[in-house]
Image (cartoon, rainbow, N blue to C red):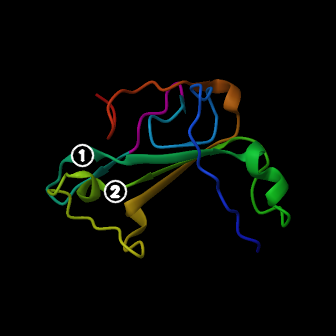
């Protein structure tokens, strides 16, 4: 498989709903809540939104047809301790230690997404 190299640059306008991007707020369909996990203390916490990828943007790189060529993949992770929440005992470093440390959501239809329904860096407010 050929690796994909991403070029990250400054943008002059806010990306539209369903656009590929890192950080910020996810575009989620109505009825889909920001994913959460149960911490070691039994409380529920939001995953940190990492990025969303519009599969149409990368379809021409998928020469082995491993992914759908439409829709949106959204990636979330338990990385609170890297962002200053030192009560989060999960530590994602060079590898993922638990399958629940990462949440990937697939939305096949980008037309039903709602733009940035949430406020705040680490989840819903």
Q: Position of residue 72 (x, y in %)?
A: 65, 42
Q: Position of residue 37 (x, y in %)?
A: 32, 51
Count neighbours of disc 1 (C-alpha within 10 A) and say few if under 14, some if 14 to 19, many if 20 or more.
few
Q: Quadrant of the C terminus?
A: top left
Residue in the picture at 56% in, 26% down: 14
Q: Nearer the viewer, residue 51 or 46?
A: 51
- Considering only vertical position in the picture, is 89 above or below 125? below
Q: CA distance from mark 2 to mark 1?
A: 12 Å
Find residue 62 and report its image quarter: bottom right
Whether tag 2 and tag 1 are in contact, CB under 8 A, the answer is no
Q: Position of residue 94 (x, y in %)?
A: 41, 76
Q: Which residue is mark 2?
A: 78
Q: Nearer the viewer, residue 123 or 60?
A: 60
Part of the protein shown in magenta: 29-35
Query: Is label 1 in a helix, a strand or a loop?
Result: strand
Task: Name the side, left or right, on which 57 lies relative to 124.
Answer: right
Q: Which residue is mark 1?
A: 44
Nearer-N-terminus badge (2/1): 1
Q: Nearer the viewer, residue 33 or 116?
A: 116
- Considering only vertical position in the picture, is 4 above or below 21? below
Q: Position of residue 105 (x, y in %)?
A: 55, 47
Count neighbours of disc 2 (C-alpha within 10 A) and say few if under 14, some if 14 to 19, many if 20 or more.
many
Residue in the picture at 46% in, 43% down: 23
Is 32 one of the magenta-colored residues?
yes
Q: Quadrant of the N terminus?
A: bottom right
Task: Name the side, left or right, on which 98 lies relative to 68.
Answer: left
Query: Is label 2 in a helix, a strand or a loop?
Result: loop
- Considering only vertical position in the picture, is 118 above or below 82? above
Task: Name the side, left or right, on which 122 lies relative to 53.
Answer: left
Closer mark to the observer between disc 2 and disc 1? 2
Magenta stretch: dominant secondary structure: loop
Residue in the picture at 77% in, 63% down: 66
């Amino acid at each position: 498989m050929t690796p994909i190299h991403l070029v990250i640059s400054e943008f002059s306008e806010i990306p539209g709903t369903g656009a590929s991007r890192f950080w910020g707020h996810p575009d989620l369909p109505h009825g889909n809540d920001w994913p959460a996990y149960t911490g070691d203390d039994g409380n529920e916490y939001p995953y940190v939104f990492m990025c969303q990828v519009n599969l149409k943007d990368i379809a021409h790189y998928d020469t082995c047809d491993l992914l759908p060529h439409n829709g949106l993949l959204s990636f979330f992770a338990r990385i609170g301790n890297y962002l200053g929440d030192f009560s989060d005992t999960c530590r994602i470093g060079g590898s993922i230690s638990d399958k629940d440390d990462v949440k990937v959501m697939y939305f096949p239809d980008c037309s039903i997404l709602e733009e940035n329904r949430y406020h705040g860096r680490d989840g819903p407010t």
